[in-house]
Image (tube, rainbow, N blue to C red):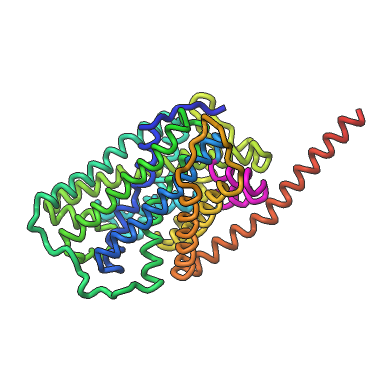
């Protein structure tokens, strides 16, 4: 039994801690370099913010209707059945959770090495060490993870506030655009890459839905935390991108990991730029803590349905952590770190995450809405939020497939393998129940 520990501020802190991870400190440089136009950069952030708010409204309603651990798994089970839910859990286990963990760790490692001047060949080593250290924090208990997320969320906001305020003070900073050299319309490859980076920068807000069973007063807390957290993140991302373009004149540094170092150095000098990079390392560690905390909740929901080994998701009664499930995620994430680069890892898990995020939110169209339920939040202007969300999800998945066909195909094959596996597991469980029932009747 999980305990309700997360109020509004703790829930918002979890979203900010997880969402504002390494993406905002890695993707703006690449977006400015490829899109080369402030209007397109801000447009991508606005589009991703709109998509996230629309999806968050649907998740808030579904989370209050089914306040159980598991999030998308529970929503898919209620709407489309256990087989579809199992494939989602399979995807979470083998694609999304380890992919997001690995991408965060690789991004963190890039900043650590940029800060220390270490060789790029050490990225996998530093990333694996980061995953192991933050998994220990998660295993030590939810209170420790929550404390880390609160402090690191403050560190992230602090870095952004310092940078944006410095830009405002320096009103005579460099040019704000490089639009003269920009194409009128980016190619599918360029736009797809930018959207993939932006989605990663927003990735993880849905993890609050996995923890509905641990939310205090879900009807009030879920919508406020989800929508409020996403709005804060969108404003911060847009402000930081404007600061970057204003100070550096749209000329992105050669490597994405030099983003905050370049921006901080231009504003305050080299020493301060490195100090800001150190704050980024602390901030991204909080994102890792949030991902590692939320992932085992999906496996718990699967175990409750008899679709996952229950021994792997035994939660400590006081710490509210699942060491074995966390260990599985750590091993898979470390494997991805050794096999791919940051962009390759994004291409592997982002399209699958977007597709299943849309599918799980679509449960709001299938499961009958209660006419009178005082404990259930109802998404306003229904069905407009889910329609907007699904249209944007379909467009983004198409762009991902064009921009990263090999990685998208690889994750699709891994996910497809879950279909026969789920069929066999559910069939075996049904046979076990049948044999048990037959045995009890015969006795």
Answer whether residue 336 is visible to the viewer in this image.
no
For residue 77: magenta?
Answer: yes
Q: Above or below — where is 69 with respect to 204?
A: above
Question: Which quadrant would residue 439 be assigned to in this image?
Answer: top right
Count of all numbered marks drawn on residues in the image:
0
Relative to 54, 148 lies left or right: left
Relative to 1, 272 lies left or right: left
Q: Residue at x 30, y 69 (%)?
A: 34
Q: Residue at x 53, y 28 (%)?
A: 2
Relative to 98, 151 lies left or right: left
Question: Which quadrant would residue 291 be assigned to in this image?
Answer: top left
The part of the chain drawn in magenta is 71-93
Q: Above or below — where is 244 with respect to 329?
A: below
Q: Residue at x 26, y 40 (%)?
A: 155
Percent position of residue 77, x then y: 63, 44
Percent position of residue 284, x then y: 34, 46
For residue 111: magenta?
Answer: no
Percent position of residue 9, x then y: 35, 32
In the displayed image of the protein, which residue is found farthest to the left?
A: 172
The one nearer the camera, 180 or 102, is 180
Q: Main secondary structure of the magenta part?
A: helix
């Amino acid at each position: 039994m999980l305990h309700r520990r997360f109020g509004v501020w703790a829930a918002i802190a979890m979203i900010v801690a997880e969402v504002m991870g390494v993406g905002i400190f890695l993707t703006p440089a690449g977006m400015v370099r490829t899109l080369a136009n402030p209007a397109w950069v801000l447009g991508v952030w606005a589009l991703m913010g709109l998509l996230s708010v629309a999806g968050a409204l649907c998740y808030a309603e579904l989370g209050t209707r089914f306040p159980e651990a598991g999030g998308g798994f529970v929503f898919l089970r209620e709407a489309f059945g256990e087989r579809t839910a199992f494939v989602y859990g399979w995807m979470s286990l083998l694609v999304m959770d380890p992919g997001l963990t690995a991408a965060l760790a690789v991004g963190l490692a890039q900043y650590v090495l940029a800060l220390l001047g270490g060789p790029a060949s050490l990225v996998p080593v530093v990333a694996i060490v980061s995953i192991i250290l933050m998994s220990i924090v998660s295993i030590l208990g939810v209170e420790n993870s929550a404390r880390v997320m609160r402090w690191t969320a403050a560190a992230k906001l602090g870095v952004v506030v310092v940078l944006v305020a410095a830009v405002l003070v320096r009103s005579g900073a460099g040019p704000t655009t490089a639009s003269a050299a920009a194409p009128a319309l980016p190619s599918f490859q360029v736009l797809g890459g930018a959207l993939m980076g932006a989605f990663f920068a927003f990735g993880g807000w849905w993890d609050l839905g996995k923890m509905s069973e641990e939310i205090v007063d879900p009807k009030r807390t879920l919508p406020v935390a989800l929508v409020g957290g996403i709005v804060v993140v969108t404003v911060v991302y847009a402000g930081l991108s404007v600061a970057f373009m204003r100070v550096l004149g749209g000329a992105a540094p050669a490597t994405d990991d030099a983003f905050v170092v370049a921006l901080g150095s231009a504003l305050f000098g080299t020493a301060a730029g490195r100090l800001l990079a150190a704050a980024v390392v602390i901030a991204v560690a909080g994102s890792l803590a949030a991902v590692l905390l939320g992932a085992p909740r999906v496996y718990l929901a699967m175990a409750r349905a008899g679709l996952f080994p229950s021994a792997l998701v035994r939660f400590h009664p006081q710490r509210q952590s699942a060491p074995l499930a966390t260990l599985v995620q750590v091993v898979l994430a470390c494997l991805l770190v050794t096999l791919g680069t940051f962009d390759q890892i994004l291409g592997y898990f982002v399209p699958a995450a977007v597709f299943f995020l849309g599918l799980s939110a679509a449960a709001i169209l299938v499961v009958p809405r209660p006419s009178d339920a005082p404990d259930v939040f109802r998404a306003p202007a229904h069905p407009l939020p889910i329609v907007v969300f699904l249209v944007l999800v379909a467009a983004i998945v198409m762009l991902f497939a064009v921009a990263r066909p090999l990685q998208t195909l690889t994750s699709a094959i891994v996910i497809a393998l879950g279909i026969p596996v789920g069929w066999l597991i559910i069939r075996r469980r049904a046979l076990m129940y049948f044999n048990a029932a037959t045995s009890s009747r015969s006795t």
